[in-house]
Amino acid sequence: MGDRRLKIREIAEIIGISYERTQNIIVNELGFHKVSARWIPRLLSVEQKRTRLTISRDCLELFEADADDFLNRFVTMDETWVHYCTPETKQQSKQWRRPGSPPPKKAKSILSANKVMASVFWDSKGVIMIDYLERGQNINSDYYCTLLRRLREEIKEKRRGMLRRKVLFHQDNARVHTSVQSMAEIHNCGFELLPHPPYSPDLAPSDFFLFPNLKKHLGGRRFSTNDEVKAAVDAYFDSKEESFFFNGLNAWKGRWQKCIELDGDYVEK
């Protein structure tokens, strides 16, 4: 079938048989059914899939060589916008109803315009540092390098011995992260950089684990000030046991394996 968006009526007209016969052939004999397109960050090229495959193999090999050493040295970071109002997920808005009763109604909600940018640095033990972008401040290489220097001091204080073992640092490929200035600062901090393939939020722990859980927790809540947002984010992470972060990073192994099985294609939830 060249055009898989054709309606049954259109197919019936093209081949000259009844609607009912066409439907029976497509659904019952061929076993076809219509599905919606799945959202993905980008349509990957062959070269991009190859890069994802190679990096997944390299990271998996490093992890499996000594998982304890990997997790004891590993630190990752990413940024996320936290809105004054984050809509509930469909799962959160579900209610128990008697059989035959009408489903609950909910007005359509959208993300609020007011928001706070949070840069979160974390590892298998928990959050090491969060920086909230101040009003009027820009995310640029100077800003990011300042965060990296602060991170090094926080690691020295909160993760004794990690600097001596050499931090295995992970970030995505945002321009501010990979600028010449930022890469030089990562080197100056003595961090070893774990590679991350472009256009791959499905292989970034903050994107597939940490931030979705944070947004789910904040779903339906409303804030009036930046300070309220910051307090809610801090309280959420403070409430989590070490096992929460450990399990999130440990799940990364399965994503690398799945990416390899898919020859570099995107890993679904």
Image (cartoon, grey):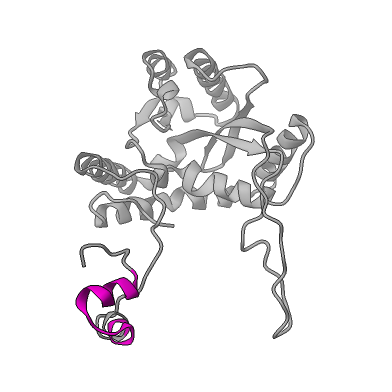
Rendering quarter of residue 257: bottom left
Pick the front one: 58 or 173: 173
The x and y percentages for residue 9 are: 33, 75
Camera-side residue: 104 or 121? 104
In the image, residue 258 above or below residue 159: below
Query: Does the segment drawn in magenta span residue 17?
Result: yes
Q: Quadrant of the C terminus?
A: bottom left
Q: Residue furthest right?
A: 224
With 106 as the anchor, is 63 left or right in this view? left
| Identity of the residue drawn at 41% across and 49% down | 252
Front-most of 16 and 38? 16
Determine which quarter of the picture holds residue 106. bottom right
In this picture, which residue range is highlighted in magenta? Answer: 7-23
Residue 236: percent from left, percent from top: 69, 45
- Location of residue 196 (image quadrant): top left
Identity of the residue drawn at 50% across and 17% down: 140
Residue 39 spot, x, y in % from top left: 41, 52
Does residue 73 appear left or right of residue 221 in this picture?
left
Residue at image coords 57%, 52%: 243
Check residue 31 for magenta coloring.
no
Where's residue 238, x and y in %? Answer: 69, 42
